[in-house]
Amino acid sequence: MKLLKLTVDNFRVFHGRHVLRLDVTDGKPAVLIFGMNGAGKTTLLNAFTWALYGTFTSDVEHQERIINDRAWADAAFGASVHAGVKLEFEHEGVLVTVLREVRAIKDSEGQDLPRPTLTVTETRHGESSEVKNGQDRIEKILPEGLRRFFFFNGERMERMFTGDGTGDVQDAIKTLMGLEMIERAIDVHLPAASRKLTAAAKKLGGGRLQQIADTQDQLEQQKLAIDRELLKLSADVSAYQREVEAAEKALLENGQAAPLQKRRVRLAKELEQEKNRYQELQDKQRRVLAERGFIAFTAGIDQAVIDLAEGMRRRQELPSGIQRDYITGLLEDGYCMCGTPVPAGSPAHTALLERLENAGLADVQARWMNLRGNAARLIDARKALLDELREISAELQAIEAKINDLDAEESDIARQLKGVDVVDVQKLEDRRKEFDDKRIEALGAHRDAKRGKEHLDEEITRLRRQFHAAKVEDTEAQNLQRQVALVDEVLEAFRRILEVRTAEVRQQLDAKVKGVFSRICIKPFTPELTPNFELKLHATTAGPAAIRSTGENQILGLSFVGAVSEMAKEIHNRKQKTDEANLDEGGIYPVVMDAPFGNLDIEYQDQVAESLPQLTSQIVTLLSQSQARGRVLEHLQTAASRIYVLRSVTSKEGAKEQNITINDRAVPYVSRGDFEHTVLEEVTV
């Protein structure tokens, strides 16, 4: 996807028509757009997303006011007023034009607008044609789930990787890798097929099948209720966490409370890490007991089996293959080992036949000896189990002691903060504790609900096995029973495929994030993309979580964007080289980024400015004059094919006109006019 041109017409702060040419040359992938606060940088960012998806980012106020205020005010009542955005880009050799516009008859001072219309046109070999379902075509080019990685505000990008954002990130990654189809099969299509077949089978298969199927339906309903509860609890945890972070930030800004709060932030990170370790060990303990706990109850049985087998062997009550072959040879020869004849019908012949019959099958001794060996191994396995459980228990006790120490230290800090003679600090501390307690309570409830869901999954799996194995007389019911079993096998296989592929993608992204981050960050921090697709930052490779600044959060987010962009490009190149069907979406995408340096200090601004052009083959950067000075501006201008200025026009009396220096010449940045609006002007590079 290569951006060519963006045209805005009476769109929000832009009065009239403004054209932004976006084509870039090799080696100069950047388009720079400078503007002061309120000039329309965020509006331009949202012009892209509104044209493509009809949506705005959450930080845009008064989203209903799409038509420029001046154009709306100047229109007479009963007159037609319109606003529109046209985006032109090239995708895989095809010129695509996306036009989204809204037209309304002014009948009031406020804008009560109809639904915008969308027109998508494709041009191939000079011939243009309108795409019937334009939104579907856009989704195939750049799925909306991936939008957040390529059109974003740099100051707010850290929200993508914390709290509620992690689920959206995971969904977007699945879109990128083409795993959504597998997920839909797992969540929708295969369960629907299984339910339909099960319903038909239970009607024909009698009471047993019906009983099993009805019990499973009840458990499935309970599981759905738990899923709803988990979603609510996750939202609650995120909301409480935001409140805690806001209070902690305010405490850090207070001079008297700041030192104590810094200590508490460090303790909170350590405490979270230890609690996670404690939870992991508890889960490990449960798995060990579930898989091997029965071994602990075999004490005495194993030795009894060994003694029994050994006694039977000594008394020759345990026949062997050699003994059987030897007796058969004596009967065939007709002579005992001492030379005495053993004719058929003689007492000796009869005794040998009885002995041969008692010898049993040739593998009886082998089976008994195998049983004896297994019994002996049980002793070793029981010892290993007990050793492992003791080790886990010791680790749990050590971690519990450390958690208690950290809790005590944190309580002491809370007590000291209470003693600070500042009313606001005390209120902030009370608020922080209130929401932290709610967060901890919600986390506990979430863990309990998750365990309840796991238990239900186990019960449902057991019932499915019973359904597959239940004996039915009706032939058609038997066929349906086999089909249900087959669907369930496919469902389980798809789940494993999704789990493996998701883990592989996470590992690949994690490695790429580490590579990009190391090029930008000046501190010895190591990023990690967790199994939940949450970005963490560690002080060392395997050390505790780093106490990171807002700027470092932004660098972490930029690193992730660069990693996603690189992976998408690799998928695209791989698809171009093979004709085989491929689930992966992939693609070469541009990056449109507002406020890339909003929370960064000078050193990091320099590093990011140097790294930005390497993120992708085309990057549109919207920034203010204060964010681009000295070496930062040099880096950006070196990589720029085009430079624009959003000139703010103000009607305020006495307002001072301002210039911005670009390529060693002054360019108007703020000017006087009859009304408030913004003018988009290109600067010669």
Image: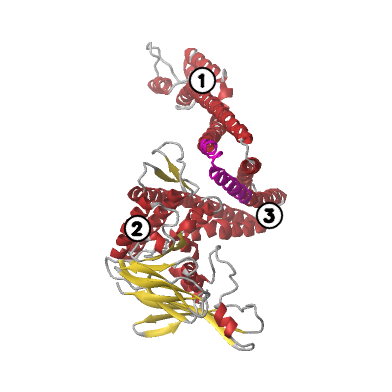
Between 13 and 443, the one lying in front of the other is 13
Q: Is residue 582 left or right of residue 478?
A: left
- Distance (Cα) linking label 1 and label 3: 54 Å
How crowded pointer 3 is (Cα within 10 Å; few <14, some 14-19, many 20+) is rated as many
The amino acid at mark 2 is Ala
Between tags 2 and 3, which lies in front?
Answer: 2
The amino acid at mark 3 is Lys
| Start-end of magenta stretch | 234-263
- Distance (Cα) linking label 2 and label 3: 66 Å
How crowded pointer 2 is (Cα within 10 Å; few <14, some 14-19, many 20+) is rated as many
Between tags 1 and 3, which lies in front?
Answer: 3
Q: Is residue 181 left or right of residue 297?
A: left
Considering the numbered disc 2 on the image, is that residue within a helix, a strand or a loop? helix
Residue 169 position, x and y percent, is 49, 55
Residue 341 position, x and y percent, is 40, 15
Between 429 and 65, the one lying in front of the other is 429
The disc at residue 609 is 2
- Distance (Cα) linking label 2 and label 1: 95 Å
Marks 2 and 1, the one that precedes in the sequence: 1
Task: Name the residue tied to disc 1.
Answer: 354
Taking the spot 56% from the left edge, 63% from the top edge, the residue there is: 58
Marks 1 and 3, the one that precedes in the sequence: 3
Q: Is residue 555 left or right of residue 282?
A: left
The disc at residue 328 is none
Q: Residue furthest top?
A: 338
The amino acid at mark 1 is Glu
Taking the spot 57% from the left edge, 60% from the top edge, the residue there is: 189
Marks 2 and 3, the one that precedes in the sequence: 3
Q: Inspect this view and state whether residue 402 appears.
A: yes
The quadrant in which the N terminus is found is bottom left
Between 461 and 54, the one lying in front of the other is 54
Quarter location, residue 300: top right
